Amino acid sequence: MKTRSIRDTTFRKEEKEVEQMEFKKKILVIGSLNMDLVVETPHMPKAGETITGKSITNVLGGKGANQAYAAGKLGGNVGMIGAVGNDACGRALKQNLECVHVDTSGIEVLENEMSGQAFITVDDNGENAIIIIAGTNGMVTKEMIQKHIKKLKESDIIIMQMEIPVETVEYVKDLASKLGKLVIIDPAPAVSNLPDSFFQGVDYMKPNETELEILTGIKIQSQEQVTVGARNMLERGVKNVIVTLGSKGCLLVTEDGEEFFPAKKVRAVDTTAAGDSFTAAFALALSEGKNSREAIQFAQKVSAIAVTRKGAQTSIPTRAEADRG
Ligand code: RIB
């Protein structure tokens, strides 16, 4: 009788993993890495008010790193381009991505510079307010992208956010579009008065209501205004817009029409990284061959779990949890 050694089994498992990785399109996240200092507070302080907080914690975050971490943890074939300082925060941020098999060789370690920082308050309703200090995220330049151009060429799906310089985001978007890559932009933090050129050729733009208002200059107070805002982005050159509407759900708007996706009801304890986990899971699902409707439904499951947990990267579910919903 032929017996199979443990070595054979391990080899087959590795072979299977490689096959699965090859089937998946490659995701490249270009963006920020931050160390988050999170203060839990009963309510947000008003201007001039002093209140007593409940706790203070350091959590690994940054919109770019959160997205790379989530896509990696969910089983994607993921790489990241970004920058950290040669400090404890930078090392921890890179290591955490490596734990979920993200290729971090595109993350530069800059001497004598400080890694990005975020100061986050989370209230009893799970709502947050965030102030970021760019640090090395502000040094992710076109030149740095050119240095890692091979990674861009080898990837299929490019995800960006706006915690690195806007010029870099637009530069990558133009380059990636020319190379036939699928470009997803999570426009956070949003910037007003961007030129139309910024929007042209973006495959998916994923603002929330506040970001939609800032980006378009259109007051968003009703579902109709959400559609008007999203259509404004289409007119300026975005191919598909997904507006996330918090606990209500999200709206997909394309030139063929629009579709509303209601959200699952959950008890949110911390909405930090809800948008990041949504974007990452959406990209991951596309990378596995799902269509945009299926990808949105998967992304909703992932972010619904993320908001029930504290912190940014600490809130991301495993693939098994996400599949169970
Ligand atoms: O989206 C959440 C993230 O925003 C936090 O992790 C913080 O670092 C800021 O970038």
Image (cartoon, helix red, strand yellow):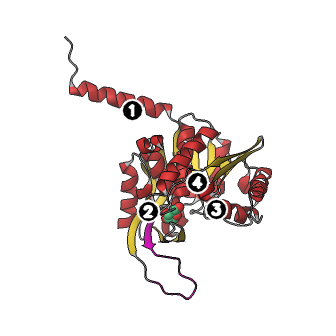
Q: Residues within 10 Å of mark 1 (few under 14, many from 20)?
A: few
Residue 303 x, y percent position in the rendering: 52, 52
Tell whether 145 sits left or right of 222: left
Which quadrant of the structure image shows residue 40?
bottom left
- Determine which of the numbered discs, if any, sits on residue 311 in the image: 2
Relative image position of residue 291 (x, y in whole percent)? 62, 36
Badge 4 crowding class, 10 Å Cα cut-off, few under 14, some 14 to 19, many 20 or more, is: many
> Extreme bottom residue here?
48
Q: Mark 4 falls on what kind of element? A: strand
Q: Which residue is mark 1?
A: 17
Q: Amino acid at mark 3?
A: Val
* Beta carbon of the mark 1 residue lies under 8 A of ligand 1: no
Residue type at numbered disc 1: Glu
Residue beneath the point at 72% across and 64% down: 213
| 138, above or below 182, in the image | below
* Eye-nearest disc, 1 or 2: 2
The one of 267 and 188 positioned closer to us in this rendering: 267
**Badge 2 or badge 4: first in the primary sequence:** 4
Label pair 3/1, CB-CB below 8 angstroms? no
Asked whether the beta carbons under mark 4 and mark 3 sit within 8 Å of each other, the answer is no
User: Which residue matches tag 4?
Assistant: 160
- Earlier in the chain: of badge 2 and badge 3, it is 3
Q: Residue at 39% across / 47% down in the picture?
A: 100
